[in-house]
Amino acid sequence: MFVRIAQGFNAISRSIIAFLILDVILVTTMLPWNVVIMFTDSFSGLPIPLLALVAVAAYTVSTPALAAAFAAYRDAPTMRYGEDENVRFRRNRTLESLETVSHPYWSAAEEHRTVLPYLRAYTRLFPRSLATSLMFGAILAILVEAACLAVSTTGGTVATAALLALCAFTIVAHMVALNLVVEFPKAHYPAMLRNGFALAAAKWPFTLLAIGVLAAYAGVMLYWPWFMLLFGTGLTFFFLYHCVEHITRHVVEQMIAEES
């Protein structure tokens, strides 16, 4: 009994440490976005439309770090506490036998490591995740600028609210596309763009949950940024990943079943 308690305590401790390490890594790999959020007052002299563009650009170049975090939540054993080892072993063996679905980003020898596997996943995913982010970033920039224009001309109307809602939906669709980048290394960019929006619309309850997670993240970042950066980023994106993973799960399972 005491041995099982000790083993459980060790597993929980390793998971907590892994999340804290991931927080520190994300502070660095999402530096442009973190700088804009942390030092918003320094940009106060900019016109609102230009400030919005700066924020969108910082968000766009920082999101490849989220793709690598999604890979960690997908495959790092310390991020999947409670999963049976035999289940994980069978899943990894299945993924290793496929060509269209990504192989595990964490090897068996790196079961308790975080930094090096994350950086390797980041390097591997960066080109495709950045290209995907640029597509969604362009759409988001248009929507944000349209919202700024609507506010300046009408002072806030139904059109402004609709544009902001579209911005939130686009961000979730972007997260869905990033997870598709993680899952499918050979998928075409137009397909990821199209499926990001289509899947987010089809699985709208999880899209709403993802928007709620993102709203909580943004709120804490505005008022307690250091707390979120050092203690909450990894955990918040963990919940975001599972919302997005539920949106894309049936596509991944279907692809695995067809290729198997």
Image (tube, helix red, strand yellow):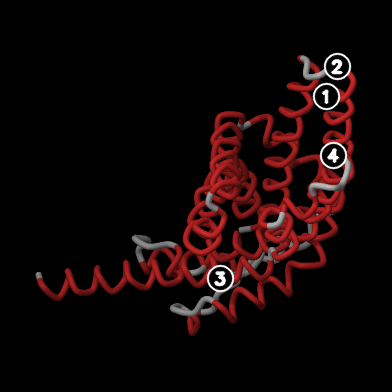
Q: Which residue is mark 3?
A: 24
Considering depth in this image, is 184 or 197 the residue closer to the camera?
Answer: 197
Assign a secondary structure to mark 2. Answer: helix
Considering depth in this image, is 206 or 26 the residue closer to the camera?
Answer: 26
Of circles 3 and 2, the one toward us is 2
Q: Earlier in the sequence, mark 4 or mark 1?
A: 4
Q: Would you say the residues marked 4 and 1 are in contact, meaning their CB atoms lie under 8 Å apart?
A: yes
Assign a secondary structure to mark 3. Answer: helix
For residue 200, above or below residue 46: above
Q: Would you say the residues marked 1 and 2 are in contact, meaning their CB atoms lie under 8 Å apart?
A: yes
7 left or right of 195?
A: left
Q: Which part of the image, by quadrant, shows the N terminus? A: bottom left
Under mark 1, the amino acid is Val
Residue 198 image point, x, y percent: 74, 34
Q: CA distance from mark 1 to mark 2?
A: 5 Å
Q: Which residue is mark 1?
A: 151
Q: Which mark is residue 48?
A: 4
Q: Would you say the residues marked 1 and 3 are in contact, meaning their CB atoms lie under 8 Å apart?
A: no
Q: Earlier in the sequence, mark 2 or mark 4?
A: 4
Q: Which residue is mark 2?
A: 154
- For the residue carrying disc 2, how many other residues have a C-alpha within 10 Å: few (<14), some (14-19), or many (20+)? few
Residue 74 image point, x, y percent: 54, 61
Residue 75 image point, x, y percent: 53, 66
Q: CA distance from mark 4 to mark 1?
A: 10 Å
For residue 139, above or below residue 186: above
For residue 1, above or below residue 216: below
- For the residue carrying disc 1, how many other residues have a C-alpha within 10 Å: few (<14), some (14-19), or many (20+)? some
